């Protein structure tokens, strides 16, 4: 499941659990692009509940949309990632170094209040 919910004017909350297939990835990316259309200086809160690697077809869909994803990422300044997996925390924060202008910080899932405070600061 990949659920995107607007939270205020410039924030999206994204809930990720389970394994994404091709159809789910198409829907999720379309929704993400649509909901971020009018965002500037945005914030994202990712809640990774139960992570599984996406299917090969879903990965192909994601790579085919990389140009539009780069444009989308430029709309956001900060992203907080809630996860209890140490390796996901490291990968998430490493991704922040790959995208100039986007700061990514990882938190334990029970630190949601801290993540929200960081996003607001």
Image (tube, helix red, strand yellow):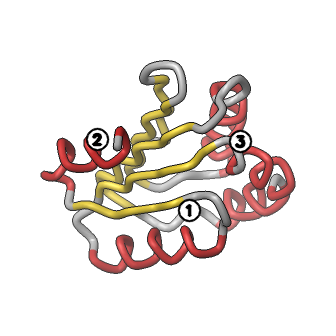
- Horizontally, residue 57 falls left or right of residue 113, namely right
**Which residue in the structure is indicated by mark 2?**
116
Image mark count: 3
Residue 55, image quadrant: bottom right
Q: Quadrant of the N terminus?
A: top left
Quadrant of the rendered image containing residue 41: top right
The front one of 108 and 63 is: 108
The residue sitting at the front extreme is: 121
Cβ atoms at labels 2 and 3 below 8 Å apart = no
Residue drawn at (64%, 59%), measured in percent from left and top?
101
**Does 13 sit above or below residue 77?**
above
- Give percent across and percent down for residue 40: 66, 33
* Label whose residue precedes the other's in the sequence (2 or 3): 3
CA gap, disc 1 and disc 2: 27 Å
Q: Secondary structure at mark 2?
A: helix
Secondary element type, mark 1: loop
User: Horizontal and vertical percent for residue 99?
Assistant: 66, 66
**Between marks 2 and 3 in the image, the one whose residue lies nearer the viewer:** 2
Disc 2 packing (10 Å; few <14; some 14–19; many ≥20): some
**Residues under labels 1 and 3: Cα distance?**
12 Å
Measured as percent of width and height from the top left, residue 76 is found at: 60, 45
Residue shown at the point (41%, 48%) measured from the top left: 46
Q: Earlier in the sequence, mark 1 or mark 3?
A: 3
Residue 26 marker: 3
The image shows residue 121 at horizontal and vertical percentages of 34, 44
Closer to the camera, 79 or 86? Answer: 79
Circle 3 SS class: helix
Q: CA distance from mark 2 to mark 3?
A: 28 Å
Question: Looking at the picture, does residue 53 appear above or below residue 11?
Answer: below
In the image, is 44 to the left or to the right of 109?
A: right
Task: Name the residue tied to disc 1.
Answer: 54
| Lower sequence index among marks 1 and 2 | 1
């Amino acid at each position: 499941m990949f659920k995107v919910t607007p939270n205020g004017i410039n924030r999206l909350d994204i809930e990720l659990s389970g394994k994404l297939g091709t159809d789910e990835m198409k829907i999720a990316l379309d929704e993400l692009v649509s909901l971020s259309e009018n965002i500037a200086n945005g914030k994202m809160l990712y809640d990774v509940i139960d992570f599984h690697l996406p299917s090969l077809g879903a990965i192909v869909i994601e790579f085919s949309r990389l140009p539009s994803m780069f444009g989308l990422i430029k709309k956001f300044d900060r992203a907080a990632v809630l996860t209890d997996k140490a390796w996901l925390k490291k990968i998430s924060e490493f991704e922040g170094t790959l995208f100039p202008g986007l700061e990514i910080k990882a938190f334990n899932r029970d630190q949601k209040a801290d993540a929200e405070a960081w996003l607001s600061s």
